[in-house]
Image: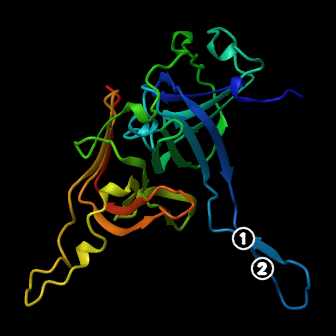
Amino acid sequence: MARMFYALQSVQFNQNGTNQILYGIQSIGASSQSDRTPVFQLGQLGTYSSYTTDDSPVEITISKQIDGNALLYPTLLGHEAGANDGVQFNFWASAGQASGGSATPASRLVMNNYTISSVSYTFEVDGVATEEITLIGDALVASTEAPEYLDASKSCATALGTRAAIKEINGGSPLGYQSISFNYSKNIESLYSLGKFRNVERYISYPTECTIDVTQDATAISAIGSANTEVAGSCTGSTGGCGGGDFSIELCDGTFIRAGNTVVTSESYQGGDTGGGQLQYVQSLSSWDDFTVTGPT
């Protein structure tokens, strides 16, 4: 038995025989759950049978530091449901082999025909910006695909997404912002057919929503509830429309994350009490069917 820790693992993206190692990975996890319904019959106390109509998909979650290397979402997007495209986990026997370029992994697992379920980005004044993606697929199976190896020359990432790496927010200065998070769900559903247990396909159930949570210092407060202000004697109140402008963040490495036609769903100010806390303006926004991520360049 060997202890399995971070230095013995790597993640790669397989694209029809052209494979790419993924850098900055912080954690990986895989899970599957089968919800079975018991069946009983008269005259018998114990279970008569059980069944499931759920094909028990496997869910993979990968967390990555934003470090100037390829992001997960734009890398994997556009290659979903590809029989020859997949995400592969490599597990090595000892530390250092993942970048050695010769040792064969002790085991390799791959998920092909994956679907992106959700993605989130978090930016805070403390720590490094992170990306987390969740994939859904039928199974995680043994892989025969050759492993890719880490490039030792990238062992000292210079473009880590700390607070100093934020170039612009909404096209302007990022000063005063304390934290920003984007959470985008694609609402993946399964389509089934009689005569087949596995799903026929997975599809996006529209509309898809991106929620954005923003914390700023109190100088950002101009009004609370201004979007709900009554306009006396007018039929031009702000109860309709497509929403406001875009909410975006750009990093110094060219990464650009954008949610379009956002609307404010809640706002408040918090803190600033006699305990010495900082007064902050907290805002939540939503956007539908209009989320894009590009970069880094």
Image-quadrant location for residue 41: bottom right
Q: Residue at x 37, y 40 (%)?
A: 78
Residue 289 at x, y = what percent?
30, 58
Q: Quadrant of the C terminus?
A: top left
Asked if marks 1 and 2 touch (Cβ < 8 Å), the reply is yes
Q: Residue at x 38, y 53 (%)?
A: 216
Label 2: element kind? strand
Q: Quadrant of the N terminus?
A: top right
Q: CA distance from mark 1 to mark 2?
A: 8 Å
Kind of residue at disc 1:
Tyr
Q: Nearer the viewer, residue 138 or 180?
A: 180
Q: Is the residue marked by circle 1 packed among few (<14), some (14-19), or many (20+) residues within 10 Å?
A: few
Residue holding disc 1: 51
Q: Residue at x 56, y 64 (%)?
A: 195
Residue 32 at x, y = what percent?
67, 53
Residue 179 at x, y = what percent?
44, 49
Left or right of 156, for residue 256: left
Q: Does residue 42 sit above or below 236 in this rendering?
A: below
Left or right of 42, for residue 92: left
Residue 98 at x, y = what percent?
65, 17
Q: Nearer the viewer, residue 121 or 230?
A: 230
Q: Does residue 279 sit above or below 68 in this rendering?
A: below
Kind of residue at disc 2:
Val
Q: Nearer the viewer, residue 73 or 261?
A: 261
Image-quadrant location for residue 38: bottom right
* N-terminal-most mark, 1 or 2: 2
Q: Is the residue marked by circle 2 packed among few (<14), some (14-19), or many (20+) residues within 10 Å?
A: few
Residue found at the very far front of the displayed protein: 274
Left or right of 256, for residue 194: right
Label 1: element kind? strand
Residue holding disc 2: 39
Left or right of 20, for residue 47: right
